[in-house]
Image (cartoon, coloured by chain):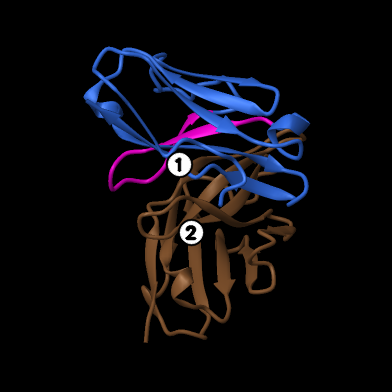
Amino acid sequence: QLQLQESGPGLVKPSETLSLTCTVSGGSISSRSYYWAWIRQPPGKGLEWTGTTYYSGSTYYNPSLKSRVTISVDTSKSQFSLKLTSVTAADTAVYYCARQAVSANYWYFDLWGRGTLVTVSS
Amino acid sequence: QSVLTQPPSVSGAPGQRVTISCTGTSSNIGAGYDVHWYQQLPGTVPKLLIYVNTNRPSGVPDRFSGSKSGTSASLAITGLQAEDEADYYCQSYDSSLSGSVFGGGTKLTVL
């Protein structure tokens, strides 16, 4: 059964870069049927889509974060990664990686990692 | 403010039926993009509850059902149980943002 696992620092200083990796196991990250996404949830708040990538390297970003976010994929390691620059306290959140189903009429997230809390603080 | 609008909270007694609305615009639900629902039990990871408006993943009880009409969608829960107490989120695609959008979430309280 496919599983996703986030990893990375739990504490990042303001103005620095947040870097997280999602490792996909039990299945292929190179599947043509799925995309791979990052979604975040600030403490006590709702879900926010951060961005999406495909095994080919195509990327799609939330316009509100586009100037600061980069998502990349490494198929040889079965991993995809998130980098968010110039972080502030507002970027403190649980960051989830997820598998994304896509068609002409939908995007949805059918499998999620456990999530990792990233706190931005000096 | 979220692109998709949900009521902040709903409640119901055990055994009752509750509905949660999700209102969008002409660039998302009204444009024909499908709606999906997630359940987030306290302290847990969001779980896909309904996909493509009306479909339940394997293992989701048929007490949960979804519908979509115009620029809105709804999640209905019948035979309410204490274990249904959770946050529920709707989600769709938005063509003006070229990406996914979520509702702000609805907290369901079972009285």
Rendering coords of residue B35 (x, y %): 61, 31
Could you tell me which quadrant the C terminus of chain B lies in?
top left
The CA distance from mark 2 to mark 1 is 28 Å
Mark 1, chain letter? Answer: B
Task: Mark 2: give few (<14), some (14-19) or many (20+) Cα within 10 Å.
Answer: some
Q: Is residue A26 above or below residue A70?
A: above
Chain to which mark 2 belongs: A
Callout 2 amino acid: Thr
**Relative vertical location of residue B63 with respect to residue A42 in this rendering, above or below:** above
The residue depicted at 38 percent of the width and 62 percent of the height is A116
What residue is shown with label 1?
B105
The quarter of the displayed image where residue A66 is located? bottom right
Query: Which of label 2 and label 1 is nearer to you?
Result: 1
Q: Is residue B1 left or right of residue B76?
A: right
Neighbor class of circle 1 (other Cα within 10 Å; few <14, some 14-19, many 20+) is many
Q: Residue B65, image x and y in percent?
A: 48, 17
Colour given to chain B in the rendered image: blue
Residue A7 is situated, as x and y percent measured from the top left of the image, at 42, 66
Query: Hey, which quadrant is residue B81 in on the image?
Result: top left
User: Which amino acid does the dot numbered 1 rest on?
Assistant: Gly
- Rendered location of residue A112, percent (x, y): 46, 46
Q: Find disc 2 in the rendering and name its residue.
A: A23
Q: Which residues are magenta?
A: B34-50
Under tag 1, what secondary structure? loop
Q: What is the letter of the brown chain?
A: A
Query: Is residue B36 highlighted in magenta?
Result: yes
